[in-house]
Image (tube, rainbow, N blue to C red):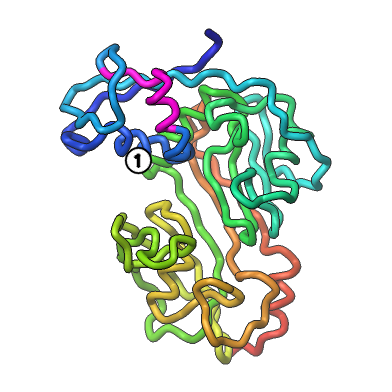
Amino acid sequence: MDSSLWQFIVDDSNYGKRLDKVLSENLTDISRAYIAKLIKEGYVLCNNKNTKASYQVKKSDKIRVIFPKPQVTYLEPIAIPLEFLYEDQDIAVVNKPPFVSVHHGSGIKTPTLVNGLLYHCKNLSGIGGVLRPGIVHRLDKETSGVLVVAKNDIAHQNLTEQFAKRKVEKTYLALVHGVPKRMQGVIEHSIGRDKKNRTKISNNTNSPKSATTQWTVKKIFKEYSLLEAVPLTGRTHQIRVHFSLLGYPIVGDKIYTKKRKNISLRHFLHAESLSFLHPTTMKRVKFFANLPKDLDDVLKGLKSL
């Protein structure tokens, strides 16, 4: 069978956890549903044996995940304008435009970044499945900025491990309501799916996951502040939720900002830089994306202090 392989040796930090939980924590770019499907269909082996998702792993267990090559994708290549910041035979780094979802999912009917990548790139990795070729990490639909894509399975696995082991360094620019009393700080709030509203992320959750965000004030305006955010973890909506919990919600955020004056057509969050070890050379590389015109225009309309 034409496939690719991912292997993992259980250590003390994972001892006693469910097999599916261990996989979801280490294969962060793959959905839980797809992991469950792989386990059910026998593509996940523990010590060379098929096992259940509920199996509690033991130290030194050898977990092997066999990723079947996706069938010929039915996703249509679409000529979406994309700015490539870098590209070689292993990776592509793009400046994701706003209002474009990274990949298809429930309720997404408009063209996605994946459609554009299929048009522009000859090869993409298959580990992410039919709907997510090449996708190693994600940005929210309205968020713009730097995103790395894997063009083969070896690069995909390497980058996935770097994200899981927190070797990837990310910086974001966010315009928030209000002016913090300090010029920098660290937010440490565990977050997860909200108990009452599953479409939201909050600290009122039955499944809290640790989350840490460092922040620094870059510029102060009359009623707003431009912050640089460095997420040390990669939770869904992390920066947006953390700034909301801090009392300085992001401008234009329709989910986590309430009863505030809106001066932006989208949430003001931009992935400014991304740094990681190149999967082939293993040398650290760093890529930047300038603030796009729509967000830059918002800043130009503000009065600085």
Q: Is residue 44 magenta?
A: yes
Left or right: 10 in relation to 174: left
The residue drawn where x is 52% and y is 82% is 258
Q: Nearer the viewer, residue 303 or 189?
A: 189
Q: Nearer the viewer, residue 139 or 77?
A: 77
Q: Which residues are magenta?
A: 35-46
**Depicted 23 relative to depicted 294: above or below:** above
The residue drawn where x is 37% and y is 21% is 44
Res 8 → quadrant: top left
Label 1 belongs to which residue? Answer: 25
- Where's residue 95, x and y in %? 68, 50
The residue drawn where x is 53% and y is 71% is 255
Residue farthest right in this picture: 79
Figure disc tally: 1
Res 272 → quadrant: bottom right
The residue drawn where x is 49% and y is 53% is 170
Give the residue type at disc 1.
Glu
Left or right: 81 in relation to 173: right
